[in-house]
Image (cartoon, rainbow, N blue to C red):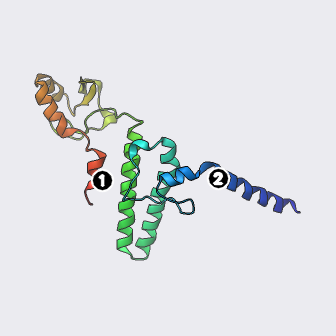
Amino acid sequence: MSKARLVAIVSVIGMAAIAVMTIPIAKASSCGMNHKQKPEMDMKNPIKAETLSLEKIHSEHLPMISQSIDKTIEAIEAGNKETALAELHKAQEILALVKDGIGKHVKPKFANIRCPIMGSPINPDKVAENLIRDYNGEKIAFCCGGCPGQWDKLTDSEKDAKLAKVKPEPIEKHSEHKH
C-alpha cells in the first residue's frame, strides 16, 4: 500500500471519527432532525434561545446562517426572488435566536439603546462617564451633558416610563413581525 493511499485512508477515518464524536445522535434529535439530515432549522418548532450554549451557537446555528446566505445568493443569481426571501427570513430567525442565546451570556453595557430624555440613539462605545447614571441596578446612558441633570429631577415612576420607551425591543417581538 502506498504512503499516499495510507494517508488518505487515515484522513477519512479521522474525519469520520471526529464527525461521530461531535455530532451525537441525541444532539441531532434535539434539533428536530434525524441523523441522516443536514442541520436545518425547524421554524414551526424552533429551539428556545435559553437552551443555546455558545458551543451550540458556534457549531450549529452559525453554519445554518451561512447556509441560508449561500442559498440566498444562489437564488438571487437564478432570479428566484421567493426562495431568496424565504432563505433571508430563515437567516433572520436563526440570527434572532443566536442574538438571544448570546445575550444570555453577555450583559449589555447599558439598559437603554436611546437617550431616555431626548430619544437620540446611544453608541455604547462613545458614552462618557458623566453621561451615565445607575438606576435600579442598571446603567442608563444619555446623549449629551444636559440629559443626566433632567433625569435626576424625574420621579421614579417618570424614570420607569421614559426608560420603558428606550430599552431594546425583546427578541420575541422582533421575530414576530414580517419584514
Residue visible at 23% across and 24% down? 136
Q: Is residue 57 above or below residue 118?
A: below
Specify whether 37 is left or right of 177: right
Secondary structure, mark 1, is: helix
Residue visible at 17% across and 39% down? 165
- Label 1 sits on what residue type? Ser
Q: Residue furthest right?
A: 1
Q: Is residue 42 visible?
A: yes
Image position, residue 95 (x, y; %): 39, 52
Q: Is residue 117 visible?
A: no
Residue 20 is tagged as: 2
Q: CA distance from mark 2 to mark 1?
A: 34 Å
Image position, residue 79 (x, y; %): 39, 77
Specify whether 28 is left or right of 51: right
- Label 2 sits on what residue type? Val
Specify whether 166 is left or right of 125: left
The answer to which image quadrant residue 10 occupies is bottom right
Task: Give the total of numbered labels.
Answer: 2
Q: Earlier in the sequence, mark 2 or mark 1?
A: 2
Residue visible at 46% across and 71% down? 74
The C terminus sits in image quarter = bottom left
